[in-house]
Image (cartoon, rainbow, N blue to C red):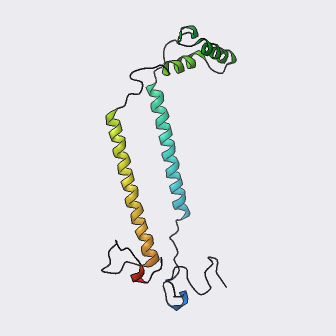
Amino acid sequence: MTDDAGTPAGTSASAPAGTSAGTGAAPAYRPPQQSVRGQLLDAAVVLVLIFVTLFATTYLTEAAETPSADPRPLAELPLTPGERVQYQKMIDSGTADLATIAAAVEANQASDDKYDIDVLALVGTALLLALYLAFVYRTSFREYREVVEEKFGPPASGHTSDRTSDTDTGRTP
């Protein structure tokens, strides 16, 4: 007979090889479960962060744009004759208006400062990313240690964390 996990009846998947759950070995590993309230709180926090990010990005982008007083006529825009015909068809069909087309053409023009990079913002972004990755690494490593301690118990005294083999503790890989 086997249980749901496919292990023989009377043995535990988390018990070391050669021992059974019924002989006083450590009980089967049960990972901690998060409550429904905790899951809902996590989901709400993620949603709020997404909405704040999207709102801030949209608001700051719209605030940075300064609308021009009157868009230049289509005939004055630096376009090829084929582009001019296509844009006129878009205006006639109501797909786009002259202001939108003029803004798109102006934004697409070659310029020396078109891709200006703010070094301070770049360094700040890199620093923020490094801090975030360090936080994620530290938190993940701490949680990994907690899971290992729950599964196998606290480390035996005198053992270091840089062991290359687990054979001295009776565990099988």
* Residue at 64% across, 80% down: 3
The spot of residue 152 in percent (x, y) is 44, 78
Q: In the rendered image, which quarter is residue 155 located in?
A: bottom left
Q: Is residue 110 left or right of residue 101?
A: left
Q: Residue 86, located in which quarter of the rendered image? A: top right
Query: In the image as oriented, which residue stretches furthest toward the right?
Result: 93
Q: Is residue 10 left or right of residue 130?
A: right
Q: Is residue 45 above or below residue 108?
A: below
Q: Give the residue drawn at x 39%, y 21%.
A: 112
Q: Residue furthest front?
A: 164
Quadrant housing residue 97:
top right
Against 91, residue 160 (above or below) is below
The quadrant of the picture occupied by the N terminus is bottom right
Q: Residue at x 62, y 14 (%)?
A: 82
| In this picture, residue 4 sits left or right of residue 141 | right
Front residue of 14/32: it is 14
Question: Residue 29: horizontal and vertical position, in percent?
Answer: 51, 77
The single residue placed furthest to the bottom in the displayed view is: 23
* Residue 157, above or below 37: below
Residue 120 spot, x, y in % from top left: 31, 36
- Residue 107 on image: x %, y %: 49, 21
Q: How many marks?
A: 0
Question: Of 100 and 47, which appears nearest the observer?
Answer: 100
